[in-house]
């Protein structure tokens, strides 16, 4: 999938390592966890702490200071079904887990637990979820 240009990214030190957050004007597109700093994560990407990328960094910093805060991470680039799954994942309370079947029920698609699992696997910022959950 093609991203809008320009792609912006920012890095932050966190208790779990160095996080790189990337996005464009449509929303967040990528997150990854590094053990050490690196060069630009993509060709022609621009480092910036403004806009949605900067807001996500600020939310993550607040989260790591006070775990349990709700993060609002607008994502872009998925199908309508994937987007509905990704939005629902953001409503799972801190420190809890739920099944793919429960997510499917919550989005009104009770027979779609496998599709929920596939959407979760296709989530471009899933590493954020792994860090947070």
Image: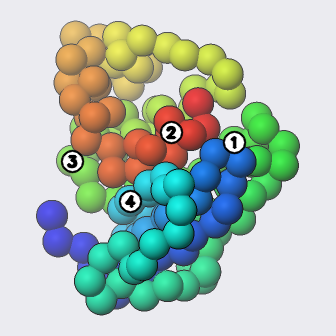
- C-alpha distance separating marks 2 and 3: 19 Å
Residue hosting label 4: 30
Q: Residue at x 41, y 20 (%)?
A: 103
Task: Say which of 86 and 56 sits in front.
Answer: 56
Residue under label 2, please give it. Answer: 129
Q: Quadrant of residue 13?
A: bottom right
Instruction: Looking at the picture, tell me which residue is in the foreground, 40 or 109.
Output: 40
Viewer-nearest residue: 92 or 13? 13
- Mark 3 vs mark 4: which is more N-terminal? 4
Q: Earlier in the sequence, mark 2 or mark 3?
A: 3
The residue that mark 1 highlights is 70
Disc 4, SS? strand
Q: CA distance from mark 2 to mark 4?
A: 12 Å
Mark nearer the viewer, 3 or 4: 4
For the residues labelled 1 and 4, the Cα–Cα distance comes to 19 Å
Badge 3: residue crowd in 10 Å (few <14, some 14–19, many ≥20):
few
* Disc with the residue nearer the chain's start (2 vs 1): 1
Tell me: residue 77, above or below residue 118. below
Q: Are there few (<14), some (14-19), or many (20+) residues within 10 Å of tag 1?
A: some
Residue at 33% in and 44% down: 123
Residue 45's place in the image compared with 122, above or below, is below
The residue carrying mark 3 is 79
Q: Nearer the viewer, mark 1 or mark 4?
A: 4
Residue at 24 percent of width and 73 percent of height: 3
């Amino acid at each position: 999938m093609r991203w809008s240009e320009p792609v912006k990214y920012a890095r932050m030190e966190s208790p779990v390592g160095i996080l790189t957050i990337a996005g464009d004007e449509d929303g967040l597109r990528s997150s990854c966890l590094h053990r050490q700093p690196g060069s630009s994560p993509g060709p022609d990407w621009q480092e910036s702490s403004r806009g949605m990328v900067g807001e996500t960094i600020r939310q993550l910093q607040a989260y790591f200071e006070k775990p349990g805060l709700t993060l609002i991470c607008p994502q872009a680039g998925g199908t309508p079904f994937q987007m509905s799954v990704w939005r629902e994942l953001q409503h799972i309370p801190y420190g809890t887990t739920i099944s793919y079947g429960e997510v499917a029920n919550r989005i009104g698609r009770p027979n779609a637990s496998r599709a929920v699992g596939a959407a979760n696997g296709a989530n471009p910022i899933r590493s954020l979820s792994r860090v947070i959950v």
